Image (cartoon, rainbow, N blue to C red):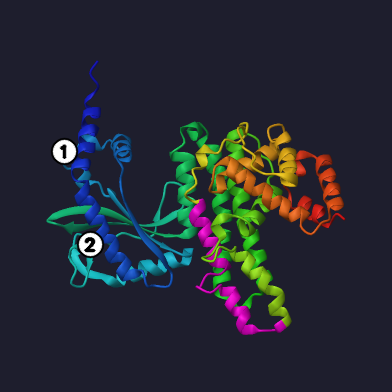
Amino acid sequence: MDKIEVFDYIEKAAAVLDANLVGFTHAANKLTEYLETTFGDIDATVGVTSRIKSRDSLKEKILRNDLYRDTPVNRIVFEMHDIIGVKIECRFFKDEQFLYEKIREVFCVDVGDGYYSPVGKKAVRLKLDTPQPERQKNGYSIYRIDGNVTYAGENYNFELQIKSLVNSFWSEIEHKLIYKNNRLNQSDNMIRELLKTTHESLSGIDHQLNLIFDRVSGNTISNQYEQLRSMIALGLNEMYTTIVKAHTGIAVSISEYSEAIVEYLLTGSSYTKNKSGDSLVKIVTEGVSRIVAEKNADEAERIIRLGDGDNYSGLIINLMEWMRNIDYSTIAIGDKIENIDVRLTGVSAEIAEIFLKSINSDFYLNTFFHIFFSLERGTDSEDFNDYIEYYANRVLAGKTQEQIYRTLATLTELPPNKLPLESTIEMLQSKP
């Protein structure tokens, strides 16, 4: 049975994209290189990235917006305004406007039809006659500017976005939870309301993160650590509460579990390491007592900034960079966790057995590990083994054999939902 004509259209459009992909890629690379050279040295800029719309995204957009009705198939990819997407990423909300004004300063030559180019570079044009930022359908604002670039005699359209780290992070969450997850489309209203709360919390994180950058030299190390831990815990709790609600239909509090995961992320996870292989937080916390004893202000400043300009503010940026690439739609809240290969021995293996005994019978313990596995790098088995080693080191460090036996006995008596909590770990640490 023959398909309707629209499917023939979108297949031909995808073929045109394939045939011209080299040109689009070169144009995007040249554009990115120019923007990076021009705006990359501005302190507020984090980076410049670009992408070419994929075949699937192209087909989806043609169908969703009825683009096949009026545009010749051989021109559709050239006339689509966002076939190339370019993003200038900055630190904070306030930096978005700052960078927009810098762009207006650079793109100052009127070349007609609302487009402006830099002096001596008419090959790159931005449409700057429309109000910015734009109001999106979801109610939030975005700096989104249409442009085009001439490369090898062909004009290529692109869309330039200016996004803070929090807004970039937020867009990934929304895109993956709503637009890329067909299971949740029927619950859009509920999910969007929950996402609204998440966005509000992330806005608070942006504000607090901004304060850390502005006042880092005036804060004590311990205060920076507490601010950082609170911010990440808040963001994790809001985000994963939304995911748990979406999967179960039940609103539950996971704040204590978020706090426990954050403590691990900051002190034991792989992506908080610096070039020497040590945790950034470990470097800071180990230096605190020495700084206090020596009252060495210069050394305190060095440790606050951690050598290469990294500090707690940089650490949260790295964390958000990674977290926004997580595919949240695949987190199987409520599913059994199976095939965990325990590669531990001795007391650590005994602790692993205590956790595994209840991992599929206790909702909160099961949810804790689903969240944990989604955040760490390795397989579920690798991450589980790493966590148990971290847990054993914390609750058993410095104890005699007799004290270790008593700690294990206490562990077996605890309710499963209490096992991973930070309050439990602290209680076991202090148990004689």
Residue 250 occupies quadrant: top right
Taking the image as shown, residue 277 lies to the left or right of residue 261, namely left
The residue that mark 2 highlights is: 125
The quarter of the rendered structure image containing the C terminus is bottom right
- Is 86 colored magenta in this rendering? no
User: Are there few (<14), some (14-19), or many (20+) residues within 10 Å of tag 1?
Assistant: few
The residue that mark 1 highlights is: 72
Residue 184 in sight here? yes
Residue 80, how many percent across, how many down?
Answer: 25, 46
Q: What residue type is labelled 2?
A: Arg
Q: Say the numbered circle drawn on residue 148.
A: none
Q: Is residue 171 above or below residue 342?
A: below
Residue 172, how many percent across, how many down?
Answer: 46, 48
Total numbered circles: 2
User: Are there few (<14), some (14-19), or many (20+) residues within 10 Å of tag 2?
Assistant: many
Residue 324, how many percent across, how many down?
Answer: 49, 51
- In the rendered structure, which disc, 2 or 1, sits on the residue that comes first in sequence? 1
The residue shown at (41%, 56%) is 142
- Which residues, given as a range, are shown in magenta? 294-323
Helix, strand, or loop for circle 1? loop
Q: What residue type is labelled 1?
A: Pro
Which of the pair 210/423 is nearer the observer?
423
- Is 318 colored magenta in this rendering? yes
